[in-house]
């Protein structure tokens, strides 16, 4: 859907009235006049907002240059211009000039739910069952934090989204494990659950508000 701030009206785009590939959208990212749309089972559309022309990208396991899976749940462009595309079978880097995808080998077959770049240029990835990952922009290396029993209260807790607070801490939303705060400087984890006042341990999103307040959405 498109909201026109000048008229206060919504306009709906769907496969029936446009060239969009599918109606079930999970990933959405806008970059100037280009809109990236990630679908359930239908790959990714690249939409030119100047004329609304659409190019759809689909792939399959083992097909060189194509997206690793057609379930695209997250899309994120870094400040260096690298466009990450998260699927249920791995993290990809999209080359918009060539229209090709390269799988990130360290996250091959990882079920990616969310991608975020923090204020230091580190890229964080939330996964379905293997914790979180961090790409160090200085060394080029990936590190996995599996969120063990000691850190998160459950092994392989499902992480659904990521956000950063004003101190540089990474807030991790989980499905059943509450909200987890990772201090990347001290390499520590702290978990908040219903025992701390949350109405539910299923956390969908955490946002950094004014005056150090964190807004947390739950079931």
Image (spheres, rainbow, N blue to C red):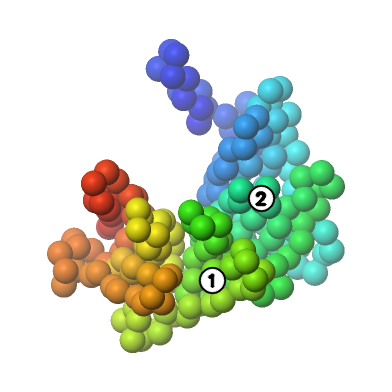
Q: Position of residue 55 (x, y in %)?
A: 75, 39
Give the residue number, with chain letter if any, for mark 1: 133
Along the line of sight, which residue is nearer the eye, 17 or 107?
107
Which is nearer the N-term, disc 2 or disc 1?
2
Rendering coords of residue 32 (x, y %)? 62, 32
| Residue 163 occupies quadrant | bottom left
Picture layout, residue 130 above or below residue 74: below
Question: In the image, 165: left or right of 26?
Answer: left
- Identify the mark at residue 144; answer none if there is no mark: none
Instruction: Tell which residue pokes out farthest to the top in this image.
Output: 7
Left or right side of 24 for 100: right
Quarter-of-image position of residue 160: bottom left
Q: Examine the rendering and report whether any part of residue 40 can be seen.
A: no
Residue pointed to by mark 2: 80
Question: Which residue is found at the position 76% from the left and 61% from the top?
Answer: 102
Which element is circle 1 on? strand
Point out residue 154 in the picture as x, y percentages from the top left corner: 35, 82
140, above or below 21, in the image:
below
């Amino acid at each position: 859907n498109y909201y026109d701030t000048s008229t206060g009206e919504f306009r709906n785009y769907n496969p029936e009235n446009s060239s969009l590939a599918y109606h079930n959208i999970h990933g959405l990212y806008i970059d100037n006049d280009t809109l990236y749309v990630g679908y359930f089972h239908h790959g990714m559309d690249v939409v030119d907002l100047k004329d609304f022309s659409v190019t759809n990208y689909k792939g399959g396991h083992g097909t060189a240059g194509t997206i690793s899976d057609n379930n695209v749940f997250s899309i994120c462009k870094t400040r260096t211009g690298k466009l990450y595309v998260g699927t249920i079978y791995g993290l990809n880097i999209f080359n918009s000039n060539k229209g090709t995808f390269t799988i990130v080998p360290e996250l091959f077959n990882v079920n990616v739910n969310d991608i975020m770049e923090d204020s230091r240029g580190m890229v964080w990835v939330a996964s379905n069952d293997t914790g979180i990952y961090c790409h160090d922009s200085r060394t080029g290396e990936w590190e996995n934090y599996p969120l063990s029993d000691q850190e998160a209260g459950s092994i392989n807790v499902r992480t659904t989204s990521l956000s950063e607070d004003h101190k540089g801490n990474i807030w991790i939303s989980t499905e059943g494990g509450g909200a987890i705060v990772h201090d990347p400087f001290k390499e520590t984890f702290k978990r908040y659950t219903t025992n701390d006042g949350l109405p539910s341990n299923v956390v969908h999103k955490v946002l950094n508000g004014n005056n150090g307040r964190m807004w947390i959405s739950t079931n």
